[in-house]
C-alpha cells in the first residue's frame, strides 16, 4: 500500500504523507516515495508543490524513523541518510515547496518542514527538535538549517529541552509564514500556490537556488569540520546514544549517564 498520496492540478503538485500507523515517521520507504514524487513533479514541470499530511491529523510527522537509526558506532545522520536525502531533495526542487502543517512536527520532521520554502500551520500545530531526547548528535547540515531559521537562543532552547513549541511562537520567530484555522488552511495554501504558478518558473527556480547556495555558504575549514565530526563521533559511539535508541524501542524513559 502506498505511503503517500499525490495529486497534480493547474501546475500545482500535492504530496500527502499517509503512513499514519507510524505517524508519518520518515522511514526510507516513505522518503523514497516522496523523493520519487518530487522527481515526477520536476518532469511534469510542476511550478509549486504542497507537502502535507491528511486533513485533521494529530501528527504531521514523527520525525526520523528511529527503528532505522544505526546502533552505536555509525554516524546516524550521514550524507546518505534518507532524511538528509529528503531535505536536499526539497531544497533542490526547482519550484517552491509549501508545507501545509497540521498536528505535531517532531525531530527530523521539523527539518523537513523547515527545508520547505513556505510554511503554513494550524494553531494547534507544534514543533519539537528532539536529538537530545534520543541522545543523537545532530549533523552539521541540520544545525545549519536551524541556525538559518531560528534565533540562536530559541534554537538552543529547542535543542536542549527537546520540548515542542507552539505555532504562535514559531510565527513570532518567522519560522512559519502564516497560521490558518484547519477549515481555511487548505484554500489559503492553494491560493498562495496559485499566486506562484502564474509567475516566471525560471526566475523563481534561480532565486530559490541562489537563496539555498547563499544560505549554506559558510567558511568551514578542514580543522573545523574535523573537530565537529570528532565531537559528534564521541556521541554516536557512546552508551547514551545506544541507550536513547534502546529506550525508544522498549517504550521507556532513557537513563543517560553522560558517557
Ligand atoms: C519510528 C515511530 C516513531 C518514530 N520512529 O502514537 O531529530 S532527531 O535527531 O531526534 C532524529 C533522530 C529524529 O527525528 O528522531 C525521531 C524524533 N521523534 C520523536 O521523538 C517522536 C517519537 N514519537 C512520539 O513521541 C509519538 O509517537 C507521537 C507523539 C509522535 C505520537 O504519539 P501517539 O500516541 O499518537 P504512538 O506513540 O503510539 O506511535 C504509533 C506508532 O508509531 C511508531 C510508534 O513506535 C508506534 O508503533 P507501534 O504501534 O508499533 O508501537 N512511531 C512513532 N514515532 N519517530 N516509529
Image (spheres, grey):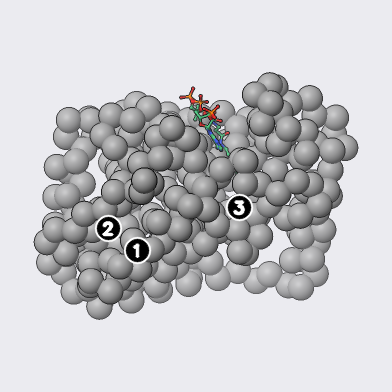
Label 3 Cα neighbours within 10 Å, binned few <14 / some 14-19 / many ≥20:
some
Image x and y of residue 16, in percent: 31, 46
Q: Earlier in the sequence, mark 2 or mark 1?
A: 1
- Disc 2 vs disc 3: Cβ atoms closer than 8 Å? no
Could you tell me how far apart the alpha carbons at marks 2 and 3 are, in whole angstroms? 25 Å
Can you see residue 99? no
Badge 2 element: strand
Give the quarter the ligand 1 occupies. top right
Residue at left offset 14%, top offset 42%: 187
Residue 256 to residue 129: above or below: above
Observer-nearest residue: 75 or 212? 75
Image x and y of residue 49, in percent: 27, 58
Q: Is residue 17 left or right of residue 26?
A: left
Residue occupied by mark 3: 143
Taking the view exactly as shown, the residue that stands out farthest to the front is: 1
Label 2 Cα neighbours within 10 Å, binned few <14 / some 14-19 / many ≥20:
many
Q: Is mark 1 within 8 Å of ligand 1?
A: no
Image x and y of residue 136, in percent: 70, 43
Observer-nearest residue: 242 or 155? 242
Badge 1 element: helix
- Disc 2 vs disc 1: Cβ atoms closer than 8 Å? yes
Q: Earlier in the sequence, mark 1 or mark 3?
A: 1
Q: Earlier in the sequence, mark 2 or mark 3?
A: 2
Image x and y of residue 221, in percent: 73, 72
Residue occupied by mark 1: 38
Which numbered mark, 2 or 1, is in the foreground of this view? 1
Could you tell me how far apart the alpha carbons at marks 2 and 1 are, in whole angstroms? 8 Å
Badge 3 element: helix
Can you see residue 36? yes
Could you tell me how far apart the alpha carbons at marks 1 and 3 are, in whole angstroms? 24 Å
Residue occupied by mark 2: 49
Residue at left offset 16%, top offset 69%: 199
Amino acid at each position: 500500500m502506498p505511503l503517500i498520496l499525490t495529486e497534480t492540478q493547474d501546475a500545482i503538485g500535492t504530496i500527502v504523507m499517509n503512513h499514519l500507523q507510524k505517524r508519518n515517521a520518515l522511514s526510507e520507504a516513505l522518503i523514497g516515495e516522496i523523493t520519487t514524487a518530487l522527481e515526477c513533479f520536476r518532469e511534469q514541470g510542476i511550478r509549486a508543490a504542497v507537502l502535507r499530511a491528511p486533513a485533521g491529523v494529530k501528527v504531521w510527522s514523527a520525525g526520523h524513523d528511529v527503528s532505522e537509526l544505526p546502533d552505536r558506532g555509525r554516524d546516524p545522520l550521514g550524507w546518505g541518510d534518507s532524511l538528509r536525502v529528503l531535505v536536499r531533495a526539497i531544497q533542490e526542487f526547482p519550484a517552491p515547496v509549501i508545507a501545509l502543517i497540521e498536528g505535531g512536527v517532531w525531530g527530523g520532521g521539523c527539518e523537513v518542514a523547515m527545508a520547505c520554502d513556505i510554511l503554513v500551520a494550524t494553531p494547534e500545530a507544534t514543533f519539537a527538535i528532539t536529538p537530545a531526547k534520543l541522545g543523537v548528535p545532530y549533523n552539521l547540515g541540520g544545525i545549519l538549517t536551524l541556525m538559518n531559521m531560528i534565533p540562536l537562543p530559541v534554537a538552543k532552547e529547542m535543542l536542549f529541552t527537546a520540548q515542542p513549541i507552539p505555532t504562535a511562537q514559531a510565527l513570532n520567530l518567522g519560522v512559519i509564514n502564516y497560521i490558518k484555522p484547519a477549515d481555511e488552511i487548505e484554500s489559503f495554501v492553494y491560493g498562495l500556490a496559485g499566486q506562484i504558478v502564474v509567475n516566471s518558473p525560471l526566475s523563481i527556480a534561480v532565486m530559490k537556488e541562489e537563496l539555498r547556495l547563499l544560505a549554506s555558504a559558510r567558511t568551514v575549514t578542514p580543522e573545523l569540520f574535523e573537530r565537529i565530526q570528532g565531537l559528534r563521533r564521541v556521541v554516536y559511539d557512546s552508551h547514551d546514544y545506544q541507550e536513547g535508541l534502546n529506550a525508544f524501542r522498549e517504550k521507556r524513559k532513557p537513563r543517560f549517564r553522560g558517557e
